[in-house]
C-alpha cells in the first residue's frame, strides 16, 4: 500500500512552512534588535560627547567668571592670563578648541589667527556676522547647543559642527567649544559596523541551527514513513491471512525532537535573563550596579542622594586577602540594606562605594545618624577557611540634595574626596568646596611636570653650605620656564603619588652627579620615604656613584617626619649604602616628632635644624633654648649640626655663639643654576 501524493504534500508542506515562518520571524526579530541597538549606541555616544563638551565649557566658564568677579587685579591682566590658559589648551585640542569672544568687542581666543582681535559683528562678511549673532543668542538661551558650519583647523575646510556656548555671568564675554560631526559620524559608523557584524553572525548561526533541524526532521519523517508502511503491511497480512502480529507506530523520536526544540527556546530565554542580570546587577553582592543606577536616575528622579564609602577598605584586601575583602563587602551590603527604609534603593557603585536613593519619609540627617550609630564600633566576624576573622568597619557618608543626572555623581565624589582629605565621617556637598579647583590645579601641575621632563627642563640649583673645613652644596629641584625657575612648592606635592615623582628623583641624581664629578665638594640630595623604598631609585643612585666616581661625597637628606615614620627602613638603606660611604642628614629637624631615641639608631652624620626655629633665634628666647639643646645633644652623639635659613648677621652671630657647625641661607648664598 502506498501513501497518496496529497498526504505527502500536506505533511512536508506543513513542515517546510513551519520552518520558513519560524526562520523569517527570528530574522525579523534579530534585525529589529540590531536597529534598536544601533540607534541606542549612536544616541548614547552623541549624548556622551555633548556631556563632555558641556562639562569642559562650564568648567572653563566658571573659572573665568570667578577670576573676573573675585580676583583683585587689573582687568586686562586677568583676561590676558586666562587667554594664555585657553591658548595652551587649544595647542593640544585643535578640533575641540575653546574660543572666547566679546559680545561688544573683538574675538579674544581662537586657533585661527585670522579671527583673533576681530569684531565679527562689524565684519563685511555677512555669514561670519550672522554666525556670531547666533552664538550670542544661544549663549543666553537654556539649550546652549547650536549646529552650524565652521572651518576645521586641521583640514582648513568648512565642516558641520555642534557647539556648546555659554555667557560669562555679569560680563559681556561668552565662551564655547564644539566637536566636528565627522568624528561623531565616524564613531557611529564603527558602532553600526560592529552591531551589523553581530546581527549577521547571529543570523548565520540561526540558519545553521535551522538547517540541522531540517535535516533531522526530514530523516525522522522518512523513518516514520517507513515504519508506517511496515504497519500497513502487517494490517494487509492480517486481512488476508487473518493473523495478528504485534507491531505499533513509533512516535517517540518525533516527541523527543519537539521536546529539544522547546528546550532550545527555553534556553535562549534563560540566557537572555542571565545576560540582563549580569548587565544590571553586581555579581558579588547581587545588588543593582552602576549601569542600573544610571537608568534608574532617569526613571525615579530622586531628590536626595547618598554615597556610603568603606574607609581604608584597601587595607582589608592588603592585610588579609581579596577573598576576605569580598566576604566583607557581601556582609556589609546586606547589613546596610537591612537598616535602610524599605523605600530606599541601594546600589553597589564601585569596589567599596554604595549609593542610596529615595529615603522616603525619613529625613537625610536622621538616616545618616542611624547608619553611623549602627556601624560605629561594628565588628564583622568573617568566616574564612574555618577561622573567624574580626574586621572593624569605618564608613564615610557624603550627601547631595537635588541635581541633574549628569552632575549628581560628580558632586557626590567631590564631597567624598573633601571628607577624606579633611578626615570627616560625614559631609553634605555645597558649592563652596574648593576640591574641584584643587583637582584642576593638581592636573595642571602634573601636565607642567610631564612636559618639563619630556623637554629636559627639570634642573638642579645649588645652595652653598658653609662648613669649617670645606663647603658643600644642597641640590634643589626646579623647573626651568624661559628665564624663570619654578619652585617645587608649585608642583612636587601634586605629583608625589605618580610615576613622574620618581622620574624627577632620577633626573636630580643624574644631573647633580654630572655637575660634581669634576669638583671636590660634597653635595646633598633630598630623598623621600618613597625613594628609600624604591629599589629602582636605589640601584640608579649606585649606578651614578660608580659611573661618576663619587664614593664618599654624597649626602642624602631625609625629612625628619619621614625618617621617623619607619626608621627600620632608613637603617636598612644606610646598611645598603655603606659600601658607597653615603652620609645621612636629617632635614627640617625640630618640626616633626623630634623623637631623640631614633637618632641613636639611625646615627645620621648631620642634623639640619629647621628654618622656623632659626630665622628669629636672635629675638626668640624659646627657640634659642631649643636650638642650643638640640645642638648639644647632637654633638654628644657625634652628629654635626647645620642651621638653615640664616638670613642676616644677627642670626649668624647667635648660631656661632651656640656652636652650630655649618650654615645655609641667603645671608651666604642663594640657590644658583651654576657654581
Image (cartoon, rainbow, N blue to C red):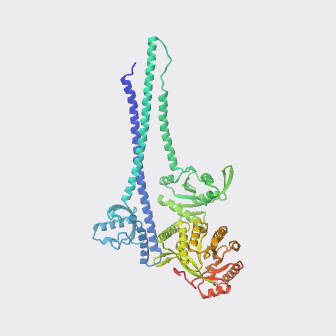
Q: Position of residue 109 (x, y in %)?
A: 38, 71
Q: Please identify the quarter of the rendering in which residue 306 is found.
A: bottom right
Considering only vertical position in the picture, is 408 above or below 659?
above
- Given residues 30 and 528, the one toward you in this image is 528
Left or right side of 634 for 199: left
Q: Please identify the quarter of the rendering in which residue 574 is found.
A: bottom right
Residue occupying image coordinates x 65% and y 80%: 641
- Given residues 403 and 365, the one toward you in this image is 403
Q: Quadrant of the N terminus?
A: top left
Residue occupying image coordinates x 44% and y 79%: 74
Q: Position of residue 310 (x, y in %)?
A: 60, 58
Considering only vertical position in the picture, is 63 above or below 204?
below
Total numbered circles: 0
Q: From this viewpoint, is residue 200 visible?
A: yes
- Given residues 632 and 582, the one toward you in this image is 582
Q: Position of residue 186 (x, y in %)?
A: 38, 56
Amino acid at each position: 500500500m502506498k501513501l497518496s501524493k496529497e498526504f505527502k504534500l500536506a505533511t512536508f508542506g506543513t513542515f517546510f512552512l513551519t520552518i520558513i515562518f519560524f526562520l523569517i520571524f527570528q530574522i525579523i526579530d534579530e534585525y529589529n534588535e540590531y536597529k534598536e541597538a544601533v540607534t541606542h549606541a549612536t544616541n548614547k555616544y552623541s549624548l556622551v560627547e555633548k556631556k563632555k563638551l558641556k562639562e569642559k565649557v562650564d568648567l572653563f566658564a566658571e573659572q573665568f567668571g570667578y577670576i573676573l568677579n573675585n580676583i583683585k587685579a587689573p582687568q586686562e591682566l586677568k583676561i590676558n592670563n586666562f587667554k594664555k590658559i585657553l591658548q595652551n589648551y587649544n595647542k593640544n585640542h585643535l578640533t575641540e578648541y575653546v574660543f572666547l569672544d566679546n559680545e561688544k568687542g573683538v574675538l579674544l581666543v581662537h586657533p585661527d589667527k585670522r579671527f583673533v582681535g576681530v569684531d565679527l559683528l562689524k565684519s563685511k562678511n555677512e555669514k561670519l556676522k550672522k554666525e556670531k549673532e547666533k552664538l550670542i543668542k544661544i549663549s543666553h538661551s537654556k539649550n546652549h547647543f547650536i549646529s552650524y558650519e565652521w572651518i576645521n583647523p586641521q583640514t582648513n575646510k568648512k565642516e558641520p559642527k555642534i557647539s556648546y556656548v555659554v555667557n560669562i555671568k555679569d560680563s559681556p564675554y561668552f565662551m564655547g567649544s564644539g566637536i566636528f560631526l565627522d568624528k561623531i559620524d565616524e564613531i557611529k559608523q564603527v558602532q553600526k559596523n560592529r552591531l551589523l557584524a553581530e546581527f549577521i553572525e547571529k543570523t548565520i548561526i540561526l540558519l545553521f541551527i535551522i538547517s540541522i533541524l531540517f535535516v533531522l526532521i526530514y530523516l525522522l519523517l522518512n523513518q516514520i514513513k517507513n515504519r508506517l508502511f511496515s504497519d500497513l503491511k502487517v494490517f494487509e497480512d492480517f486481512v488476508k491471512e487473518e493473523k495478528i502480529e504485534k507491531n505499533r507506530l513509533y512516535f517517540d523520536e518525533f516527541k523527543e525532537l519537539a521536546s529539544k526544540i522547546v528546550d532550545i527556546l527555553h534556553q535562549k530565554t534563560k540566557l537572555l535573563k542571565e545576560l540582563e542580570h549580569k548587565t544590571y546587577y553586581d555579581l558579588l553582592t547581587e545588588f543593582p550596579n552602576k549601569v542600573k543606577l544610571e537608568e534608574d536616575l532617569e526613571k525615579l528622579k530622586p531628590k536626595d542622594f547618598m554615597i556610603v564609602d568603606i574607609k581604608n577598605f584597601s587595607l582589608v584586601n592588603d592585610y588579609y586577602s581579596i577573598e576576605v575583602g569580598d566576604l566583607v563587602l557581601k556582609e556589609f551590603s546586606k547589613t546596610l540594606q537591612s537598616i535602610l527604609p524599605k523605600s530606599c534603593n541601594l546600589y553597589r557603585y564601585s569596589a567599596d562605594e554604595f549609593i542610596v536613593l529615595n529615603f522616603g519619609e525619613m529625613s537625610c540627617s536622621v538616616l545618616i545618624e542611624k547608619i553611623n550609630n549602627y556601624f560605629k564600633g561594628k565588628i564583622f566576624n568573617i568566616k574564612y577557611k574555618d577561622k573567624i576573622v574580626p574586621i572593624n568597619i569605618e564608613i564615610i557618608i557624603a550627601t547631595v540634595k537635588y541635581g541633574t543626572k549628569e552632575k549628581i555623581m560628580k558632586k557626590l565624589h567631590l564631597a567624598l574626596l573633601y571628607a577624606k582629605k579633611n578626615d570627616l565621617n560625614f559631609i553634605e556637598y555645597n558649592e563652596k568646596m574648593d576640591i574641584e579647583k584643587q583637582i584642576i590645579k593638581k592636573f595642571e601641575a602634573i601636565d607642567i611636570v610631564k612636559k618639563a621632563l619630556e623637554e629636559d627642563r627639570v634642573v638642579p640649583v645649588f645652595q652653598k653650605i658653609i662648613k669649617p673645613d670645606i663647603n658643600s652644596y644642597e641640590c634643589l629641584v626646579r623647573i626651568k620656564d624661559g628665564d624663570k625657575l619654578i619652585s617645587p612648592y608649585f608642583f612636587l606635592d601634586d605629583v608625589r603619588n605618580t610615576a613622574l615623582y620618581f622620574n624627577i628623583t632620577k633626573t636630580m641624581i643624574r644631573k647633580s652627579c654630572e655637575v660634581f664629578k669634576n669638583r671636590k665638594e660634597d653635595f646633598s640630595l633630598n630623598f623621600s620615604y618613597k625613594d628609600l623604598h624604591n629599589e629602582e631609585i636605589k640601584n640608579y643612585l649606585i649606578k651614578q656613584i660608580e659611573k661618576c666616581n663619587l664614593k664618599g661625597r654624597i649626602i642624602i637628606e631625609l625629612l625628619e617626619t619621614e625618617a621617623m615614620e619607619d626608621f627600620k627602613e632608613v637603617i636598612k638603606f644606610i646598611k645598603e649604602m655603606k659600601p658607597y660611604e653615603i652620609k645621612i642628614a636629617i632635614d627640617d629637624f625640630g618640626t616633626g616628632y623630634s623623637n631623640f631615641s631614633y637618632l641613636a639608631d639611625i646615627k645620621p652624620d648631620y642634623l639640619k635644624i629647621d628654618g622656623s626655629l632659626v630665622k628669629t633665634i636672635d629675638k626668640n628666647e624659646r627657640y634659642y633654648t631649643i636650638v642650643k639643646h638640640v645642638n648639644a645633644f647632637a654633638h654628644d652623639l657625634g652628629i654635626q649640626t647645620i642651621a638653615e635659613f640664616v638670613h642676616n648677621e644677627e642670626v649668624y652671630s647667635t648660631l656661632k655663639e651656640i656652636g652650630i657647625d655649618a650654615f645655609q641661607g641667603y645671608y651666604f648664598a642663594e640657590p644658583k643654576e651654576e657654581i
